[in-house]
Image (cartoon, rainbow, N blue to C red):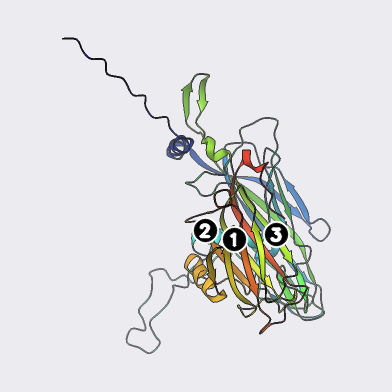
Amino acid sequence: MATPNVPVQAAPKMTPQQQDAIATRAILASSVDRIQAVAATTVFPASNPALLIQPINVGLIKRFTILVDGHIANTGTTDITLTQYGLANIFAQGGVQYIDLNNYLRVNTSGAHLTMLASAKRRRSYGATYDDNENGPNGAPNQNNRSKMLNVSPAEWGVFHTADTIPAGGSQQFNAYFELPLAYTDDDLRGSVWANVLNAVQQLNLTFNPQPVTADPNDNTFAIYSGPAGSAGSITDATITVYQEYLDQLPKAQGPQGVTTILPALSLSTVYELKSTVFQNIPPNQEFFIPYANQRSFVSTFATFNHNGQFNGRVLGDDLKYWALLSANATYIWKLDPLTCTLKSREHLMSDLPAGTYYFASRRHNIASLQFGNLQLVALSTDAFEAITPASYINVMWEAFALQNTLASGASLAS
């Protein structure tokens, strides 16, 4: 009896996402994590605040860790006090920039944004310690009980270091770390940069805060220290060490063109953007619309509202009625008062942000401007308790994904 002809079904073709996931798993399983110092230099920011660093073209780059060690001098006539943003403001607005191998500006933001973002992605303060070295209540039967075996207090090591106050004419050493991510996480390689190329240059630009100390009534949102009238100061010297973290010895496979390196093509074509934008003159008692640029997937948004542009312009929610996310058809996706926004951010950060600063997480479901059309972050200010002046502003800090081949047709993020 003849065997019937049974049609053979072709195996389903894998999607780019499936191919990328397989390549990522292969890379993570066999590659070598390397951390290498690519720059170590001393600068004098008062006369030369900008520093250009060229990372080495090797491996699949995931991030840079930036160590800054230096001194701040109080050149004024009064004591100066650490602001709420503190050491995070060593690099102010636009002080951290990364230009990739295709000459695209992926990162154009501040040290404060990097600090808050590193905390949000870890769901705890970046590099922080917990105050867990406790005894039982004094005088109680259990007063000699201990909360842990090691007798080590929090902040024993000077990973982050500076004084709360610098007296007039004094100088204070500081130590700070910043994480500049190119890939989203160690396990999610979207945004990573394959640097094993010739005739292409990537660039890291660091610019120190030109006004690290402010005097009241000037705005101290972007300052490291502040004080009453007569306060002044500068970063006198700083030593910067930049560590490049990358994957080396990636797996290889035999292909039509010979042996090739396995790469996550979709992840490499994805840009991980960190940008910041300042919107001026927020009108009182009416909605102010902040557009999300199209062709992107926004992972998080930070926003700082200062209602008068001065040192007392950032408050604990009394100058706003609500924040909201508005879709193209004028539907509110969410609409929350300031304290509820803070409650939600506490669930992600396990700590509070500086006064007037809010965190809107969209990691579980990204704000996809390509999918939903034009989306806008909405702020409704109120002058019921605080006067909203023309000097008011909202500083918005964005975290987003975008595909390289669609960026040319999408609106750029203002910066």
Q: Residue furthest left?
A: 1
Note whether 297 is above or below 74 in the view shown: above
Residue 401 at what x, y percent from top left? 58, 48
Secondary structure of the residue carrying tag 2 is loop
Whole-angstrom CA distance, mark 2 to mark 3, is 19 Å
Q: Which residue is mark 1?
A: 301
Q: Are marks 2 and 3 in contact (CB under 8 Å)?
A: no
**Which residue, given by chain and number where applicable, does mark 2 sit on?**
362
Query: Could you tell me the amino acid type at mark 1?
Result: Thr
In the orientation shown, which residue stands out farthest toward the top? 1
Q: Amino acid at mark 3?
A: Thr
Instruction: Name the mark on residue 125.
Output: none
Q: Nearer the viewer, residue 398 or 173?
A: 398
- Structural distance between the alpha carbons of marks 2 and 1: 8 Å
Cβ–Cβ under 8 Å for marks 2 and 1: yes
- Please indicate, yes or no, whether residue 353 appears anywhere in the rendered image: yes
Position of residue 122 measured from the top left corner of the image (x, y, whole percent): 50, 59
The mark nearer the N terminus, 2 or 1, is 1
